[in-house]
Amino acid sequence: MNRFFKGLFSIIILLFIISSLIFIYSKYIEPFHITIEKVKISSSYITKEGKDIRILVFADTHFGEFYTTKDFSKAVDSIKKEKPDIVFFLGDLIDHYSQYTETTEVAEISRLLNQIEAPYGKYAVFGNHDYGGGAEYIYEDIMKAGGFQVLVNESLLLEDLGIKIFGIDDVVIGYGNPGIVEKGEEDLYNIVLSHAPDVADKITDYPVDLILSGHTHGRQVNIKYFDDVILPPYGKNYIRGLYSLQTKREAQLYVNAGLGMTQLPFRFLSPPELTVLYFENR
């Protein structure tokens, strides 16, 4: 019996050590270890002028208690090293703006965003926290001060590249209208920005080539058995990474895992991410 209790005690100690190491790693190490995912996008619709560009995507900073401007400054340094041609931010800038009392920090967010350079522009869309967190009437100002153009159910044409960009507003609690994508043009490469990835299922009949989303944080704590609890509305079908969709134009969807955290100050097996997209002809 003594051997049994000694063995049981050893197992308990081992489990405690493992749990402690996971806790330390997921709170103090992984959340601040930025990964740069370089993703090859293939399409027969990308133009000769557009095929050599580099697109950088980031999302879900959730500035607040768990993610600071000091953390973001490191991400900005990494972005600048990549020398992107176009930059997209996919929403959820501040976790809870109504509780974000650091007014000097808001100005610092814009200052850091303004350090990012991209010759063909910087563009953004609203996320659900940009509405629900109390930032609905200030988010666009913050982004504009940082040199970003916010697209709210609207599109723009990068004529020199043969690229059309659609920005769908947040569909969780905002005013998202996926129907705007019906104006995609057959002779252009059509990129859709949508904070929530499951919008992809609503636009497959339109001439879409690339959909870029965030929202899921790649589960943040990447244990798929808890998807019903972890994954947000409109973020349950496409979790992280590159997906090929069954559409006429063989569209692709990329879900960025985001930089910050919400609800809990942990990331586990889902490190913060910057995505660099480059093209090849199909």
Image: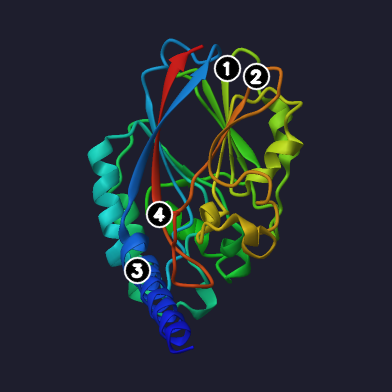
Q: Is residue 249 above or below residue 2?
A: above
Is 266 drawn above or below residue 257 in the view shown? below
Cβ atoms under marks 3 and 2 closer than 8 Å: no
Q: Earlier in the sequence, mark 2 or mark 4?
A: 2
Q: Residue at x 57, y 54 (%)?
A: 216
- Which of the marked residues, 3 or 2, is nearer the chain's N terminus? 3
Of the numbered discs 3 and 1, the one sitting upstream in the chain is 3
Disc 4 on helix, strand or loop?
A: loop
The answer for how far apart the CA atoms under marks 3 and 2 are is 40 Å
The residue at the point 33 percent across, 32 percent down is 119
Q: Earlier in the sequence, mark 4 or mark 1?
A: 1
* Gap in angstroms between the C-alphas marked 2 and 4: 36 Å
Q: Secondary structure at mark 1?
A: loop
Q: Residue lying furthest bottom in this view?
A: 2
Which mark sits nearer the N-terminus, 3 or 4? 3
Mark drawn on residue 185? 2
Q: Is residue 200 left or right of residue 158?
A: right
Q: CA distance from mark 3 to mark 1?
A: 39 Å
Corner quadrant of residue 23: bottom left
Q: Nearer the viewer, residue 236 or 114?
A: 236
Q: Amino acid at mark 4?
A: Pro
What residue is disc 1 on? Answer: 188
Residue 68 numbered mark, or none = 3
Residue 199: x and y, percent?
69, 42
Q: Secondary structure at mark 3?
A: loop
